Amino acid sequence: MFDKSTWIKLPRNVVVGHGVIEELGQAVAELHLHGDPLVVTSPTPNELAGDRLRAQLDDPTTVTIESASFDSIERVTEIARDIDAGYLIALGGGKPIDIAKMAADEIDRGFVSVPTAASHDGIVSGRSSIPEGDSRHSIAADPPLAVVADTEVIARAPWELTTAGCADIISNYTAVQDWRLAHRLKNVEYSEYAAALSEMTAEMLVDNAASIRPNLEESAWIVVKALVSSGVAMSIAGSSRPASGAEHLFSHQLDRIAPNKALHGHQVGVGSILTEYLHSGDGGRWRAIRQALDSIDAPTTADELGVSDDEVLEALTTAHEIRDRYTILGNGVDLDAAVETATVTGVIDRE
Ligand SMILES: NC(=O)C1=CN([C@@H]2O[C@H](COP(=O)(O)OP(=O)(O)OC[C@H]3O[C@@H](n4cnc5c(N)ncnc54)[C@H](OP(=O)(O)O)[C@@H]3O)[C@@H](O)[C@H]2O)C=CC1
Ligand SMILES: O=C(CO)COP(=O)(O)O
Ligand SMILES: [Zn+2]
């Protein structure tokens, strides 16, 4: 008997382009939501685009959060309950978007994502990443009901946020390899559609790498479209597998060992160079990944990440411990192998 079933949750309206923040009201109206919105934002995005966003709505309550934390989720949830919010609107980078995503989930309401930076694929996905102490929780939630990504606003965000978003996409190459490996060796559920979409997204971004330059609105356009596509791949898979493999474990571990040194996307990019080498050795695509990262000004070395060689080695040799997700790291990479991997790929310099 055929007894498989799947449930794919996707954003209904995705609006990307110049000045589309002015179309937020229409994008929301088409969702037929009831009740008043609660706008969740952080200081800089609120200053840059808060008034334009609020002008689209009927005098909404705004809550500004300073940090991504469980306390912030609680505060936003409480305010949303107090005003009996019908839905939430997140305006900003990953921080307010993750908080709104979690709070909306908590009160069983939808949320709309209005990213002001293209810093990683969490801005369009159904996953949140919330730091707590020296660890980080990756939590499943519903994806946004709509995404309204104004490329005019995003193009003005600090360039390193955009290059981090690009690197998060480039890392899909190794994430998919890890997923296939886990499927073959551990019978992990796998979707060929999600894997193909994720790989194609990385490929298109690399093919367009030459057009990704600072202060170019077209760059914001390319990166946002790629992030949306990667988010859709995760929705089809029903997990972050298409976009998160061993390179993400390496990054999550770096977050613990060397907190707040580098952006998520930059860390996973360097992780991808390392794990591609582990997958395929010297003949693999690690040079192509490094070249792609380099061409968009993303870090390719420990030094450029602002971490030490030892921190890279510790992250690489312990990354397998932090999550029950089978990858090329298997039961752990020996220190000797880690030194060779990081030295050959030029991530560390042990001359
Ligand atoms: N859900 C997921 O899958 C993932 C979630 N994350 C989470 O996302 C967060 C990191 O994302 P990130 O986007 O870097 O975080 P932030 O939301 O903190 O944004 C980064 C910085 O850029 C500022 N900023 C945002 N937009 C603009 C703009 N247009 N112009 C100028 N400055 C701007 C913010 O200002 P201000 O300080 O005023 O907010 C902040 O200082 C972390 O909380 C991390 O845990 C990370 C990876 C994956
Ligand atoms: O960052 C992500 C995908 O790019 C989400 O991955 P995690 O599930 O590892 O948090
Ligand atoms: Zn990521």
Image: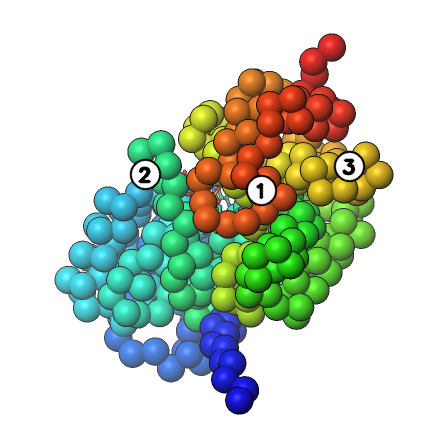
Residue in front for this viewpoint, 158 or 102:
102
Residue 41's place in the image compared with 88, above or below, is: above
Badge 2 or badge 3: first in the primary sequence: 2
Q: Residues within 10 Å of mark 2 (few under 14, many from 20)?
A: few
Asked if the beta carbon under badge 3 is closer than 8 A to the nearest atom of ligand 3, the reply is no
Placement of the C terminus among the 4 image quadrants: top right
Q: Which residue is mark 2?
A: 132
Q: Residue at x 26, y 62 (%)?
A: 106
CA gap between label 2 and label 1 equals 26 Å
Q: Earlier in the sequence, mark 2 or mark 1?
A: 2
Q: Report the residue marked by disc 1.
A: 330
Where disc 1 sits, the SS reads loop
- Is 50 in front, or is 176? 176
The image shows residue 125 at horizontal and vertical percentages of: 49, 60
Contact (Cβ within 8 Å) of mark 3 with mark 1: no
In this rendering, the answer to whether 10 lies above or below 298 is below
Q: Earlier in the sequence, mark 3 or mark 1?
A: 3
The amino acid beneath tag 3 is Gly
Q: Residue furthest left?
A: 82
